[in-house]
Every structure is written in structure tokens, then in C-alpha cells.
Image: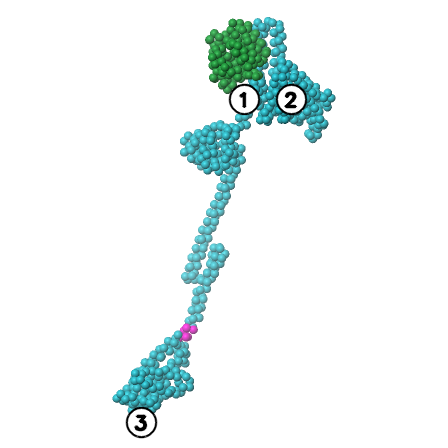
Chain colours: A cyan, B green
Amino acid sequence: MVFQYQHGDRLADIRSQGVSLVRALSGVPYEQLVPGGEQQSVVQVLRHRADDNDFAYVSIVDAQGKSVNEMVADGVIVPAAKIPEEPSSWLGENHLELLGDQRKIIEFHAPLLDDSDLQGFVRLGYLYPIVGFSVSQLPFLAAVALPVFLLVPLFYLLLRLEVRPVRAASREINRLIEGESLRRVEITASGELGEFMQRFNDFVALANSRIQGLEQDQQRLITSAKLVTYRKNRVETVLETLPEAVLILDESGAITFANQKLAALFGVSQDVILAQAPQQWCNNPDVLALLGKYQDGGKGRNFTDTIRFSLEEISDKSIATKTYPLFSPEKASSAFGTLIIFRDETREALARQARSDFVAHLSHELKSPLNVLNLYSESLLSEAGKSEEFRIEAANVIADEVHRLSSLITGLLNMTQIENGSLTPDRNLVKLRDVASAAFDEARHSAVDTDITFEFDAPKEMSPIFVDKDLIRIAITNLLSNAVKYNSDGGKVCLTIEETEDAIQIRVADSGIGISEEEAVKIFDKFYRSHDEQVQSIGGHGLGLALTKQIIELHHGSLSLDHDRTEGAEFIINLWKETTAVKQAI
Amino acid sequence: MKRIMIVDDHAMVLRVLRLGIEEAGYEVESASNGSECLVKLCNGHPDFLVTDIDMPRMSGKELCMAIEEQFPDRSFPIVVLTSRTELEHRDWTASIPNLSFMEKPVSVRRLVSFIGQSLAGTTEAVSS
């Protein structure tokens, strides 16, 4: 670029010099340019131009182009002249080539006139300036190049020195990004970079400390969340494991928790209870009224509320609720919610009812003989008592009623003892036919006033069996007594004993009112009394079958009801023979 | 002579009550259960009716309700002998006027006295 610039500069110089010089020579009279003899021409005066590196030649030609005087630089052969024909192009320049070395020539030409007569032309040639290095430029170029050559490595070294820590810092930062870690960048640098790196490291330290803090906070949060989840799960598991149905209300009375048992109680899913209004899943007015009391700030609430209700549409369960205020651990004076426990009291209710029925029946059973005793004792003191016949009758009746009372009380005691486990059967080898026969005779005797017929069928020879004969007699008597009590007019009571290889089977059948399938599962329950009006009208305390079953089970036997009968009822006692019983016990 | 109807399934009870009431100067008619009593009522009403509750075929309760239904204009008082003391066992009597309870064990003397007062129109229910 420098050479190109110099070349352009020089060409302009040549053109300016050439044009002005050729014009100057054009004004000189022809004779002075081509003097005769020894006279020195103007052309010779221009000889010193030969020192000029670019000067090639000056030539005076006549009108025909023939050279008449010339002055040429060393080594230059003047090329043939091109004479311009048109006067308009007499003054101008041409670009020619030197003969021999083909260097380019820039030639300026001008006409030589004598009173408008063309006498010839002056040709002034300059060598075209050479583009590139020339020896003459060497000092200049050297002067320019030297500082460049000296400074470039210096700058390069300086740059390298300055850039190295920056590149190192960049590498380190890249490594941090790739390693996804934030640590101090160890770079030795001074000046601005040193300060920058110091600040960068301060920033890294600050960021690290912040990250550490955040990580600790996050760790604490995770631990805390885990703890909260664990506690929540623990509480929910406890609430789910509770045998009762549980409902938790918040301060506003909205349901916040319901366990599976509550959902099952109302026959809906837990989600339904949580998401829908109580009216959607419960149609029991008592429950809705209870929940209503806790809504809207719970103005009507009363934590002693207890209601008892039955969900007849869903089940025949008897439910009792109990409400407890939930106090905040921080502020014990205010309740932040309510716990409502729905307790299934069906068993208790049944037991209560059964116990109440039992006491009523028992009182009836006790009072009936007492009534007779009272009436007879009173009558003995009245006019009727004076009759010998009446006194004998009264004595018999009183003895019978005392026996009835006594057997009732013995039965109760036996039952209590069996239940407590304090009754040990007094087992002996017993001829079951004799025991059954005695019970049969007693039953037949007690029903002498009725038109019931009795049948007893037992093999005369039977293996003796290892039982408590008194208890077994009570069991058979109870079954026979029921067979008589619940029989119909002209009915029949059959006592049958059969012996098999392993057991002895006692069957007591009647032709009475029978037992419905629904009641068949309950009749062995203690205190159970049929709700059938017909049965209700017959005296009983709901103890006979329960006691009988307990006695038979105490002997490892079984008592069952024959379900296949269409008329009356048949109870079957199975007592295992000694060997089998012993084997089973082992 | 005033006629007293006694209903009880226990022959012994029936016999002793009859003796005591007859001794007090009343005529006694007896039935061993509710249905038998109802049949006899169709032939004529007594001046007083004494009935047990637990009886086969037709209980005392059923008898009282049947009387109330069949003879709404009856004039004779009824006394029910019962061993049940619980009030709920007496709910059914609320709609039946001129009916009293007497708890077992029954005293013939007290019963005769109650019948006498009742027939004289000066009685109060022995128990309610």
C-alpha cells in the first residue's frame, strides 16, 4: 500500500513536471532548440535532467517526425515518434514502450510553431515510475520498518503478558462452569485484572456463602417437610387405626378429615365426605343438626354433645357420638377445631337390651313362683286354710314352686360358673340312657296336663360315656322343656339316642312352632328371646339354650339345630366317646 | 251378687284367687287365657275383670286391646296382674281407660280390697 501510494505520488509529479516543461520548450524558438554549429542548444541545457532517475529523453523532431536534436538518458533508445495529425492533439501525452527492455515511457509532446507554421515537435519522455521497492527508498523504508520490527514483537510480548492472566482467568471460569462448582480462582495478576480477579473471588466467596446458606435452608426445609409428612402420616394412621369412626372439623365447622371407618359407616367414599356438604352424604337429621352447630364459628356448639342414632337406611347400627374440642398446643384457651367420634354401640346396645330383657324375664320367672307361694301362704291363713284338703294341696304346690325357684337359681349359678371358668365338670363314666331317661320322665311328668305325646328311643346297651351326669341332665332337660313349651296342641316330643363308632348323638325333636332361619343364628346367644308374639307369651328367660350349649361345649361336644326340618324344631347333641375325646385332646 | 272374671293360665293361681274372692262374697268366673275370656264376655260382662299377662294363645295385653276394640262402651274396670315393673311394658295401656296394674306377688286380700273400692267407685289405681 505504501508503494502504491508512492507510485501514484511520483506519477503525478512526473505529469506536472513534464506538462510544464514541454510547454516551456514549445515556446522556445525552433532555432534555439536546433542551433547550428557549435552553439549549445536549450536541449543540452536540460542535460542535467539526466540525473533525474525518471527522465528518459528530450527530442526535437521536424514536421515529418524526423529527429533533429535530442538528449537521451543512459541506456535509453528513443522510440519512434507518433506525429499527431490533428492540431487539437498536437499538445498531449503518449504512453510508449522502450525498445529492448520494454519499460514503459510516458511521453509529453508539444508543437513547435513559427507564426502558426508547424516546424516540428518537442518530445519529452519520462520513465514510468517503478512500483515496489527501490534501493533509493531503502533508507526511508528501513527507517519506517525498524521501529515496526522492533515494536511489533514488543507489543506482542506485552500483549501476551497482559492477555495471559485474562486467558487463565477465562480458562478457570470455563472450568468452573464445566465443573458446575463455584470456587476461588487462583490467578496471579496485577493492576486492573488483579483487582477484577480479587473482586471476582470476593463475589465467588459471597456467592458460595449464599449458596451454602441456601443449601442449609433447603436441607432444613426438606427435613422439616419430611418431619411434617411423617407426623401427618402418623396422625392419620392413628386416626385410621382407631376402632371408631372419626371426623375432624376446623374452626369454621368445615370437615377437614374423615377416616375410612366414617366413610364406611355412611356408605360413601372419604373424598365425598371431604368435598361435599353433609346433606349430600348424610340424611340423618340428628347428625346434620350436630354438624350444623359447629358451622359459622360454632356459636351453637357444645362440646358435651352426645347423640345416639341409628342409620337404618344403611345399616341397623346404633351409633353414639362424642365431641371433643381440639386445643392449640400454643394457646390452650382457644379451640381450633373439633373432633367428633362416632362410636358403634350396636353390641353394647344389644347387650343392654338383652340384659334388660333378661332381667325382666328373670324377674318374671322369679315372681311367678313367688306369686303362687304368696297366694297359698295367704290362703292358708284364711277360711280356705281350714280345709285339710287345701292344706295338702298348698303344701304340694309350695314344694313344687320352691323346686322351680331352686332349679332356676341353680341354672343361673351354673351358667355364671361356666362363664367364669370356675365350674369343673365332675366327670365319670355314665350310662347316658339312664340320665336321658330320668330327664325324659321329668319332662313328661311336667306336661301331664297337656295333650302332648312323648317318645323315647335309645338302645338298651350303650357304651358308657365320660361326662358330668348332672350337667348333661340339665342340658337334656332344657331341650325337652323347650320342646314342650313351644309345642302345639296334640304335638309330639321325641328323645332319640344313637351310638356311632366315635360319638353318642342325642336328638330332641318337637312338632311345635319351629324356629325361623333368621332366629336360628341367635337362639344360642345368652339372654336372646324371640320377638315372636307367640314365643313372647310363653315364659322363658333366654338362658336355657345358652346354658345347654355351654354345658355341651364344656364336654367338647357340639349342639346344633337341624335346619332341614319343615315342622317343629330338632336339636342335636354330639358327645364324643372317651377314646375319641382323649385322642382329640391330645 | 257382683261377678268377677279371673283370667290366668296357672290353674293353682286361678284356684286360690277364686277361693279368696268368693270368700269375700263375689261370684267368680274364670278363663285360662285371653281368647277363652273373650268368648265368655260375649255372653255377658262381669262387674270386674282380673287378668294375668303372660298366657298362651292370647296374652293379657292382647285381651285388653281386644276388649277395647270389641266393647268400647264397657263399664267394668280391669286390673292386670304383672311381674313387669318397667314403665315401657305399660305403654300400651295409655289408650285404654279404666285399667290398673297390680304387681306380683299378688296379695288376695289387697286384690279383694281393691275390687271392693273399685266397685264402690272410690278406688284409685293401685299402681300406674
The magenta segment: A144-149
Residue beneath label 1, please? A356
Amino acid under disc 1: Ser
A156 above or below A482? below
Comes first in the chain, label 3 or label 2: 3
Left or right of A391 on screen, residue A265: left
x, y (%) of residue A180?
A: 49, 55
Give the CA separation, mark 3 to mark 1.
177 Å
Q: Name which residue lies at 42% across and 35% down.
A: A252
Label 3 lies in what chain?
A
Density class for disc 2 (Cα within 10 Å; few <14, some 14-19, many ≥20) is: many
Q: Name which residue lies at 41% across and 73% down.
A: A148
A580 above or below A142? above
- Both on one chain, marks 3 and 1? yes
- Main SS class of the magenta portion in the image: helix
Give the CA separation, mark 1 to mark 2.
30 Å
Left or right of B27 on screen, residue A12: left
Give the CA separation, mark 3 to mark 2.
187 Å
State the SS at label 2.
strand
Amino acid under disc 3: Gly
Q: Which mark is residue A36?
A: 3
x, y (%) of residue A409?
A: 60, 18
Density class for disc 1 (Cα within 10 Å; few <14, some 14-19, many ≥20) is: some
Residue beneath label 2, please? A509
Label 2 lies in what chain?
A
- Both on one chain, marks 1 and 2? yes
A30 above or below A334? below
Q: Nearer the viewer, residue B10 or A534?
A: A534
State the SS at label 1.
helix
B30 above or below A542? above
